[in-house]
Image (cartoon, helix red, strand yellow):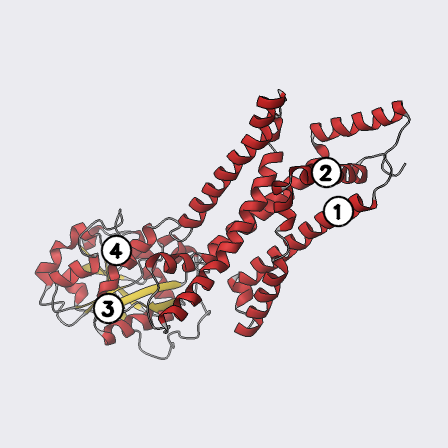
Amino acid sequence: MENSCTNALPLTVNSSQKKETVCIFGTGDFGRSLGLKMLQCGYAVVFGSRNPQMSSLLPSGAEVLSYSEAAQKSDVIIVAIHRDHYNFFIDLIEVLHGKILVDVSNNLKINQYPESNAEYLAQLVPGAHVVKAFNTISAWALQSGALDASRQVFVCGNDTNAKHRVMDIVRALGLTPLDQGSLIAAKEIENYPLQLFPMWRFPFCLSAALCVFFFFYCVIRDIIYPYVHKKENHIFRLAISIPNRVFPITALILLALVYLPGVIAAILQLYRGTKYQRFPAWLDHWMLCRKQLGLVALGFAFLHAIYTLVIPIRYYVRWRLRNVTVTQVINKKDDPFSTSSALLGDSYVSLGILGFFLFVLLGITSLPSVSNMVNWREFRFVQGLCLHFLVGIPCHDFWPLLEPQLGLKLQRTIELCVWRCTSPNSAI
C-alpha cells in the first residue's frame, strides 16, 4: 500500500495550502480505493453512504456522512455507485445544484442502455455539471499503485470549467487525463473497458484465414497429391514441414498489408485532389490496425525461425541422412561437391537470416518506448531502410513454394548442412 502520492507528475498538493475536500458517494471497493489515494495525495475525503453507521473498512482520516450531508461538504462529488441505484439523486436535486458530479460507473455489457450512465445522471440532476472520468482505472491498481500500464484517464463533459477541475484532480493523483470532448463521448468511454482486443480482431482473423488457406494448399500439394498419384504416405509433414512453409508466407503477406493502406490512402488523396476528406471506414480501420498487423507478422516470423531450428532433430531428417550415408558407403560412391548448390543453399539461408533481422528491427522501432526516443525523420529513415531491404527477402519464402524441384533441392541442402554442423561426429 502506498504511503504517499506518486511523484511521477509534479502537480501535487502543497502541504502549506488548505486541503481541498472531495466527496465520494459509495463505500464499495472502488470508492474506498479512490478515497485512500486522495488522502495520500493531500485531499480531505468525505464519504456519502445510505447507512453511515454501518460503513466499515474506510480509510483512516476519512469522514462518512449521509448523502445529503456529504454533498454539502464539497463542490466535487465522485459517484462510485451503480446506475441501478441512481434514483436517490432525485431527492438531492436542490443540494446538488451547481456541483460537479464525476460519474465513474461501468456497465456489464457494451451498449447495455440507450444512453450512457453519465448522460442518464445528467438527466436526473439537470442543475449539476456531470463529468465522466476514472472508469478505466481499477480499484486494485489504485490500492497497489500498479498504475504504470493504466495511467490514462479519459475525461469528458459539457462544462469546460468542471472538466478542467476534474482533470486537475486526475493530475494530482499522478495520472494522465485525456480530454475526450463533450458528454456524448461518455458512451464510448464506458464501452472501452468492456472491449476485448478491439484493434487485434481484424489482424487475428486475417492471419487465421491466410494460415488456413496456405495450410490446405500445402496439404493438397504435399500429402494428398503424392498419395493419389504415387501411393506415398507423407502424413508426417503435417507437424513441422507444412507449418514451416505457412508461417513465413503469412508473415510476409501481413507485412505487405502493413504498408499497403498507406499507398492506397496516398492514391485516394491524389485522386480526390485534397487531403481534407475522411477515408472510407474500411481504410480508416485498416490503417489503425497496421501496428497490430506488423506485430502478428513478427510473431509468425519467430515461429518460422523456431521451426527451422528443430530440423536437425526430426526423425525423418536423421533417417534420410543416415540412409544416404550408408548407401554411399556401400556403393563406394560420393556425390561431387557442387559450388552452385552450396551457393544456392547459403544464399537461401542468408536471405532468411537477414530478413528475420530486419523484421525484428522493424518491430523494435515500432515499440512506443523506442519510437518515443527518436524523432519523426529518424523513425522514417529506419522504417524506409528496412522496407527497401525487405523487398528482396520474399524470394526466401516463395521460391520453394512456386518451384517444387528447387524447394526440394534447397531443403535437402539445408538439412544436410545443418545436420553436419550439429552432429556429434561433425568434426571427424
Circle 1 residue = 344
Amino acid, disc 3: Ser
Image quarter where the C terminus lies is top right
Quick one: SS at disc 1? Answer: helix
Residue 73 position within the rendered picture, expressed as x and y whole percent measured from the top left: 20, 69
Q: Tell whether label 1 touches label 2 (CB within 8 Å).
A: yes
Residue nearer the viewer, 136 or 369: 369
- Amino acid on which disc 2 is placed: Lys
Around disc 1, counting alpha carbons within 10 Å, would you say few (fewer than 14), some (14 to 19), or many (20 or more)?
some
Give the residue type at disc 4: Ser
* Mark 3 vs 2, N-terminal side: 3
Mark 1 or mark 4: whose residue is earlier in sequence: 4
Task: Tell me if 388 is positioned left or right of 94 in this view.
Answer: right
Q: Which residue is mark 3?
A: 182
From the image, tell me which residue sits under label 4. Answer: 105
Residue 102 position within the rendered picture, expressed as x and y whole percent measured from the top left: 24, 64
Residue at the disc numbered 2: 409
Q: CA distance from mark 1 to mark 3?
A: 63 Å
Closer to the observer: label 4 or label 3?
3
Identify the element where label 2 is drawn: helix
Q: Residue furthest front?
A: 229
| Mark 1 to mark 4 CA distance (whole Å) | 63 Å
